[in-house]
Image: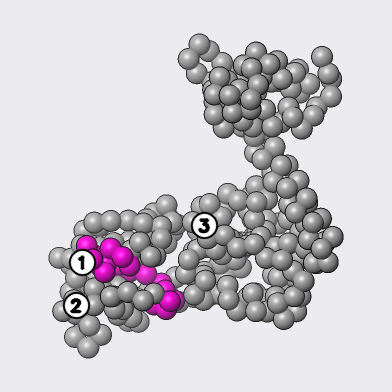
Amino acid sequence: MSNNLELRHLRYFLTVADELHFSKSAKKLFITQPALSRQIKQLESYLNTDLFVRDKRNVSLTKTGEYLKDEAEFLFNHLDFVQQNILHLNAGDKGQLRIGFVGSAMHSIIPGLLKQIHAQSPDIHTVLTELTNQEQVDRVRKDELDIGFIRTMRLPDGLRKKDVYEETFCLVLPKNHALDKHNFDSVKDLEDEAFILFSSQYSHGYYEKIMSIFEDQGFTPKVAHESVHANTIFRLVENGLGIGIVPSSLKQGFDLSIKFIDLVDIPQRTTLSAIWKQENRNPILNQIIKLLK
């Protein structure tokens, strides 16, 4: 039995940690279950600890196993980044920057930032991925993203944040709705309407801020649908299934049968923030952070 920790041990471990089922994991790895069990036992022997709690029906991670899962995911994500960065460096690029963003950031911050990056360093290769707030936080922590643009939420230790854009909210209504910017008085006018909102999964803090708008108006909204995607909300509004409240930057870029009413007279504002991991090792990141205003 080898006394050396090898990457294959960690790959096998991560598969079992994700599946929490040895038989399914073995099939996924194209090895036999006894062979997989031996590899996991080798890893546990090398680390001198149990990584899984096993019984006849269930498999679960020990506290040590949970720790190793986080660290192994980070390790493989970083190795993948290093490999991709080497390819870009060999091709003459300065390197790769992985950017996550919520949809509204593409209507406000992202285009201008990309123009600045291209003007200063056209040899930086950018990879952009639209994700929910929580997905970005998770991927920044695991070194799958270098920087994310989220609606403000509580961040775990080790992550840094810089507020980059503050804006108002607006109502989204079907184009044929009786209310428009000329006869609209307050959100209270819509007390009997159904609402379509960004889900609390999008950002709990953002969702609570939306709820505070209704609280200030003295009613609890009838929430008919929730989504993490603006286009889904707009499509539902367009089909008369409810009214939305979204950041004002989302008024642009959609050719749908909907209309917007700015909520400029309410105190609530929504903030878009850049987040990154304090220990991120991508040398390009500090250059990009300096561009954020």
Q: Which residue is mark 3?
A: 131
| Quadrant (top left, top right, bottom left, bottom right) of the C terminus | bottom right
Q: Give me the residue at 41% from left, 57% from top.
A: 228
Amino acid type shown at disc 1: Gly
Image: 134 above or below 211: above
Amino acid type shown at disc 3: Leu
Q: Position of residue 280 (x, y in %)?
A: 73, 55
Image: 257 above or below 92: below
Q: Is residue 280 magenta?
A: no
Question: Dot 1 lies on which element?
Answer: loop
| Quadrant (top left, top right, bottom left, bottom right) of the N terminus | top right
Q: Give me the residue at 15% from left, 65% from top.
A: 192
Residue 15 sits in which quadrant?
Answer: top right
Q: Which residue is mark 1?
A: 240
Q: Give me the residue at 56% from left, 55% from top.
A: 136
Q: Of the residues under marks 3 and 2, which one precedes in the sequence?
A: 3
